[in-house]
Amino acid sequence: MDPNTRAIVELAWARVLKLPDDALMARPSGRVTRVDDSMIMFVTLWEHRVLAAPERILLRAADLSDTELADGPTLLGLSRDPEPGTCTGRLLGETTLSFADSYVSNDALKSVLVTDDVAAVTDLERLCPPDDIAEVGLSKMDWKFATLDDTDQITAGAGFDEWEQILGHLGVLTPPALRRYGFGTVAAGIATNEALDRGLIPQWRARRDNSASRALAARLGFDEVGSQTAVSLAG
């Protein structure tokens, strides 16, 4: 990955984490912390480590290792505070973060039929399990599309949200019956190239236990350089 790409990603994530723009650009001297009463989130990005959480939880987490903080059950345990009226947590997930700065080269990207009809994306979601629909959130993305075969049947879909007008946060959705045929790879490649065309850095986030998604990202040229573990808090 180009050093300039890394600097841009660090800038974007500093803003996502509500830190000063240069907070992730200098050599880290330790874990960065920020008070956030709405969630507990631990992010690694190259050698950087950031923990955002309510102040009382930051204090309790001070002696925990990075490995422990990247563990979902550990973060969830920190949210279980015996004090009356304090927050309880819900684990949002343990994920990896990958980025790309090169176009995907694949002849299939030029020949596949593509539609940006919102109805087609909705129809695609009806073919997929509810958990997949919720995780990807394709129909709610800033830019999305569906791919079709030569009989106009939907084969996959992809898109991205713009984060901080810097990152293109990708999502890919393929019906279970059509997986392992390369349809998702083609859709993801189109979305990656479109994000780059728009001056965005493509970002791929995958559940840590989703080896297929992480392998697909690697095949498309994404570099896995970080992780995000998050717990939402409700009063």
Image: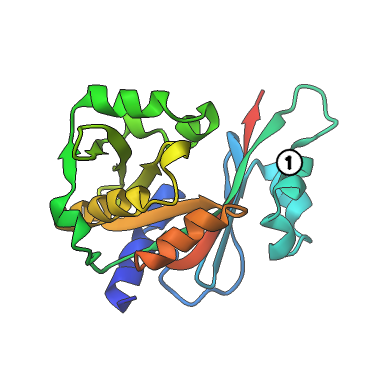
Q: Is residue 222 visible?
A: no
Q: How crowded is the residue under tag 1: few (<14 C-alpha within 10 Å), some, or many (20+)?
A: many
Question: Could you say which is closer to the camera, residue 19 or residue 102?
Answer: 102
User: Horizontal and vertical percent for residue 191?
Assistant: 26, 50
User: Horizontal and vertical percent for residue 151?
Assistant: 20, 34
The N terminus - image quarter = bottom left
Q: Under tag 1, what secondary structure?
A: helix
Q: Residue at x 25, y 48 (%)?
A: 165
Q: Is residue 168 left or right of residue 70?
A: left
> In the rendered view, how is the structure colored?
rainbow
Q: Is residue 116 visible?
A: yes
User: Horizontal and vertical percent for residue 203?
Assistant: 37, 55
Q: Residue at x 42, y 27 (%)?
A: 127
**Quarter of the rendering containing residue 66:** bottom right
Q: Is residue 155 left or right of residue 54?
A: left
**Quarter of the rendering containing residue 201:** bottom left
State the residue position of label 1.
76
Q: Residue furthest right?
A: 82
Q: Is residue 49 left or right of residue 89?
A: left
Question: Could you say which is closer to the camera, residue 48 or residue 158?
Answer: 158
- Say what amino acid the circle numbered 1 marks: Leu
Question: Could you say which is closer to the camera, residue 150 or residue 231?
Answer: 150
233 shown above or below 210 = above
Q: Is residue 216 left or right of residue 52?
A: left
User: Horizontal and vertical percent for residue 138?
Assistant: 36, 34
Q: Residue at x 54, y 31 (%)?
A: 131
Q: Residue furthest front?
A: 151
How many discs mark residues in the rendered view?
A: 1
Q: Residue at x 66, y 56 (%)?
A: 70
